[in-house]
Image: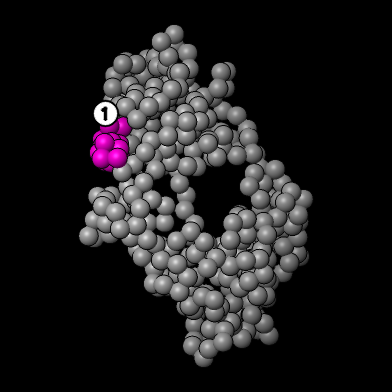
Amino acid sequence: MRTNMSWSLAVVLASGLASGLIACGGDDGGAPSINTTADNVCDQVSDVACYNLYKCCSEGEIEKFLDVTDPRTADQCRADVHTLCERQVAQLEFSVKNKRVTFDSKTMDTCLKAIVAPDGDCATIDSMLPWTDACMTSAWTGTVATAGACDFNVECAKDNLCGPSRTCVALPTDGMPCLQDQCATGAYCDGVMCHVDHMAGEPCSATSQCQKDLFCDLTAATHTCTALHAAGEMCSGTGTCMEGETCLAGTCSGSTQTCDSATDCNGHCAGETTTCFEDEQCSTGTCSGTTTQCFSQTGCVAPSTCVFPIACVHPTCDGAVCADAHITVDYCTAATTALPL
């Protein structure tokens, strides 16, 4: 099961948090001091949010972003963010008090420090967002084992969900029916059943079916899990290069059309002049190893794939290559909406 453990305050800020600013930050007006506990999380979050917004956004940007028509004072900014934060963490605080969730200050501190705008900079260029790794893991961790009492999913230990009977239920493994479209770590849900994540060279229809550091190469004749490409290696679009790398676009052979892979280039059905982009536009397929008809890759139950008798033939995509990513890190908006909750 692939999960993204980043928790975001985007829902709070995007909902119209009323916080125009005059000044935010530490007591001396500088960057806030980060030293979180389970009791002061919202104080820390509001300090970071207000510091970044005031330091890096113009008044007009702040008012537009926060959906207000007039500035607020620094104290009002922190009070508003704090109030909204408290509503977001109420469930977590309840679970911590019941000793079903633990809070890790170090994890939260690392994340918040990565989000604070650096001295002298409000926008930088990097290969990835500074908080990508720092905020990957939630500071709140469920501790209730399988069959233990729970009120919320967050209270259950890894690879468990809180079931209808308010007890933690283990996520299913290979060969078992999916539970709320989820499976245990190392397995994926095909919509019905759980299957072990595929290794390199094994067939797939989506990257979510492949093990870590692999992607499903949909440009190959047989779709297989393939190792992510390193800098300088040929690639076939977003998600096919290693972390910190980006796939620079190439050009369709015989034209000036840009492309990430051959499937981006205008193609034609084999033996015909009919224009196409996908094999499914040329003929009806059959799920491999069966006689079941399919019209797309989602029409087959893994590991079976949809095989089309007439292929969509594409020109080659020349020059698409992995290279260092150049990402603009905007501490006015992107960092603020990444605040961890």
Residue 205 in view (yes/no): yes
Vertical placement of residue 324 versus 241, above or below: above
Residue 174 magenta-drawn?
A: no
| For residue 276, side relative to residue 57 (left or right) | right
Work out whether residue 172 or residue 206 is closer to the camera in this orientation and state it: 172
| Residue at x-position 67% and y-position 75% | 221
**Coloring basis for residues:** one colour
Q: Say which residue label 1 marks.
A: 83
Residue 256 in view (yes/no): no
Q: Secondary structure at mark 1?
A: helix
Work out whether residue 209 or residue 148 is closer to the camera in this orientation and state it: 148
Q: Quadrant of the C terminus?
A: top left
Relative image position of residue 289 (x, y in whole percent): 56, 87
> What secondary structure do most residues of the magenta stretch adopt?
helix
| Residue at x-position 47% and y-position 13% | 30
Give the residues drawn in magenta, as a range.
Answer: 84-99
Residue 89 magenta-drawn?
A: yes
**Could you say which quadrant of the image residue 179 lies in?**
bottom left
In the rendered structure, which amino acid carries the disc numbered 1?
A: Thr
| Residue at x-position 51% and y-position 91% | 291
Residue situated furthest top in the rendering: 28
| Residue at x-position 25% and y-position 40% | 98
| For residue 101, side relative to residue 316 (left or right) | left
Mark 1 crowd level (few <14, some 14–19, many ≥20, 10 Å Cα): some
Relative image position of residue 143 (x, y in whole percent): 36, 46
